[in-house]
Image: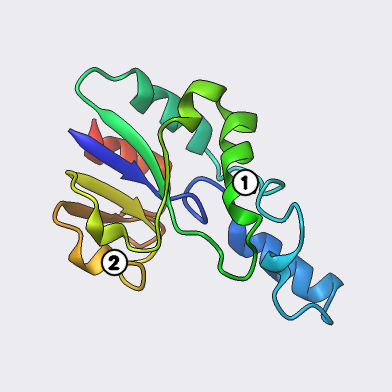
């Protein structure tokens, strides 16, 4: 089973950092355009431990699938470094940065959005992270395992 996991607001807390940046630096229109924005994102509760369980589960072929920030060309590098910082170098080989997630073939996509980056045409099952049915990693893990 091929499983893709989004980064922003699924593995790492993008929204909180945006909100804080807009309060602390309102003159910066796009806080995500600043250096180190993506690398310094905090993990979502239970995301790291859940990913480690999925990585170790036989029969699951796990990848991180994230869209780049067009406002920050450094996002490609910073997202790659975030993965190594929170997991290990080996897992960076399973990082896919793609603007259209619907182009990839797989069984499950865990994402906080249901459209906008090709999620609506993904051929497998879309698990809408953060909604009523899947509000957190515990609910996602129950569904997958």
Mark 2 and mark 1: span between their CA atoms?
Answer: 22 Å
Horizontal placement of 79 versus 52: left or right? right
Query: Which of 60/84 is in front?
Result: 84
The kind of secondary structure element at disc 1 is helix
* Color scheme of the displayed model: rainbow
* Neighbourhood count class around disc 2 (C-alpha, 10 Å): few under 14, some 14–19, many 20 upward: some
SS for callout 2: loop
In the image, what residue occupies the spot 44% across and 24% down? 52
Left/right of residue 142 with respect to residue 74 in the rendered view: left
Query: Do tag 2 and tag 1 residues touch (Cβ < 8 Å)?
Result: no
Using a 10 Å C-alpha cutoff, classify the residue at mark 1 as few (fewer than 14 neighbours), some (14 to 19) or many (20 or more).
few
Q: Which residue is mark 1?
A: 77
Q: Which residue is mark 2?
A: 118
Looking at the picture, how far across and down is residue 81, in whole percent? 63, 38
Residue at x 56% of width, y 64% of height? 69
Quarter holding the N terminus? top left
From this view, report whether residue 37 is shown above or below residue 81: below
Nearer the observer: mark 2 or 1; the answer is 1
Establish if 66 lies above or below 69: above
Percent coordinates x, y for residue 78 in the rendering: 64, 47
Residue 75 lies, in percent from the top left, at 61, 55
For this orientation, the residue located farthest to the front is 73
Quarter containing the C terminus: top left
Name the residue located 35 percent from the left edge and 73 percent from the top edge. Answer: 116
Q: Is residue 109 above or below residue 83?
A: below
Indicate the quadrant where residue 86 lies. top right
């Amino acid at each position: 089973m091929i499983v893709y996991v989004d980064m922003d607001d699924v593995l790492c807390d993008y929204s909180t950092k945006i909100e804080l940046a807009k309060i602390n630096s309102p003159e910066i229109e796009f806080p995500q355009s600043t250096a180190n924005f993506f690398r310094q994102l905090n993990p979502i509760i239970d995301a790291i431990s859940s990913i480690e369980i999925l990585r170790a589960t036989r029969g699951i072929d796990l990848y991180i699938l994230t869209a780049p920030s067009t406002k920050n060309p450094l996002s490609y590098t910073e997202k790659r470094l975030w993965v190594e910082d929170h997991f290990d170098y080996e897992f960076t080989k399973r990082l896919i940065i793609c603007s259209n997630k619907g182009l990839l073939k797989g069984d499950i996509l865990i994402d906080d959005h249901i459209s906008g980056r090709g999620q609506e045409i993904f051929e497998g099952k879309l698990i809408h992270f953060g909604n009523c049915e899947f509000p957190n990693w515990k609910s996602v893990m129950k569904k997958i395992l």
